Amino acid sequence: DQQVKQNSPSLSVQEGRISILNCDYTNSMFDYFLWYKKYPAEGPTFLISISSIKDKNEDGRFTVFLNKSAKHLSLHIVPSQPGDSAVYFCAASEGNQGGKLIFGQGTELSVKP
Amino acid sequence: DVKVTQSSRYLVKRTGEKVFLECVQDMDHENMFWYRQDPGLGLRLIYFSYDVKMKEKGDIPEGYSVSREKKERFSLILESASTNQTSMYLCASSLYTGYQLGTDTQYFGPGTRLTVL
């Protein structure tokens, strides 16, 4: 049973527009959520996170929104740039699970010039 | 900055060979993890370790073992490589204190692309 799901395998956006990547989860005990970005042939790099006590966290062009009642989080990238083209993974953790993260399947973002 | 290094970027092995993948982190992190990444399946946890000589199975431990003799080093072992173990292998580490939110953030190495023929 997949506890973290990214239902869109791919997303294409024009440069300068907003990219919205979505993630749904089923475990209400998750209390920390993260987004990672991955380029081909490289390891994922940490992008932004949010704890369950917040509903929004912003870092430059990246904003993560958390809707606990819907068990949904989203990553907004504004404005999108060609260098943002990568695979984005959302991940979640439950506080007493030894630091384990549960990852979604990933969404491949393509930003067209 | 956290640095996680993996012994090889690309590796080609034959079916039945014993394969060692090594990972080293330089941030004195308590926890280390091994994942494999396959298209459409995301990152799946193979094994993790929260202390020297301690290990716990992840979601897909079959066919793998691990070793953590020193805090900074975590090795993944494929006892007898098979073609279905062809994948990208990723190592990660985290501080994780258990009581401080945010310490779950994991930092990844560059990955090892393993091909088993």
Image: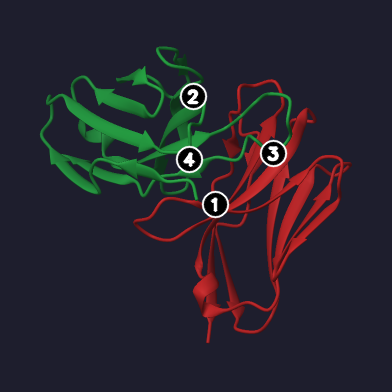
Chain colours: A red, B green
Secondary structure beneath disc 4? Answer: strand
Other-residue count near label 2 (Cα within 10 Å), few / some / many at <14 / 14–19 / ≥20: few
Say what amino acid the circle numbered 3 marks.
Answer: Gly
Q: Are marks 2 and 1 in contact (CB under 8 Å)?
A: no
Q: Position of residue A4 (x, y in %)?
A: 65, 39
Q: Are marks 2 and 4 in contact (CB under 8 Å)?
A: no
Secondary structure beneath disc 3? Answer: loop
**Which residue, given by chain and number where applicable, does mark 3 sit on?**
B102
**Which residue, given by chain and number where applicable, does mark 1 sit on?**
A106
**Which residue, given by chain and number where applicable, does mark 2 sit on?**
B59
Q: Position of residue B109 (x, y in %)?
A: 39, 45
- Spot the residue most to the top: B53
- Along the polypeptide, which appears first: circle 3 or circle 4? 4
Secondary structure beneath disc 2? Answer: loop
How far is mark 2 from mark 3, CA to CA? 23 Å
Say what amino acid the circle numbered 4 marks.
Answer: Leu
Looking at the picture, do discs 2 and 3 lie on one chain?
yes
Q: Position of residue A5 (x, y in %)?
A: 64, 44
Q: Is residue B34 left or right of residue B114?
A: right
Name the front one of labels 3 and 4: 3
How far is mark 2 from mark 4, CA to CA? 10 Å
Name the front one of labels 2 and 3: 3
Other-residue count near label 3 (Cα within 10 Å), few / some / many at <14 / 14–19 / ≥20: many
Looking at the picture, do discs 4 and 1 lie on one chain?
no
Name the front one of labels 1 and 3: 3
Up-down: is A62 above or below B8?
Answer: below
**Which residue, given by chain and number where applicable, does mark 4 sit on?**
B43
The front one of A9 and A58 is A58
How far is mark 1 from mark 3, CA to CA? 21 Å
Q: Chain of mark 3?
A: B
Looking at the picture, do discs 1 and 3 lie on one chain?
no
- Along the polypeptide, which appears first: circle 2 or circle 4? 4
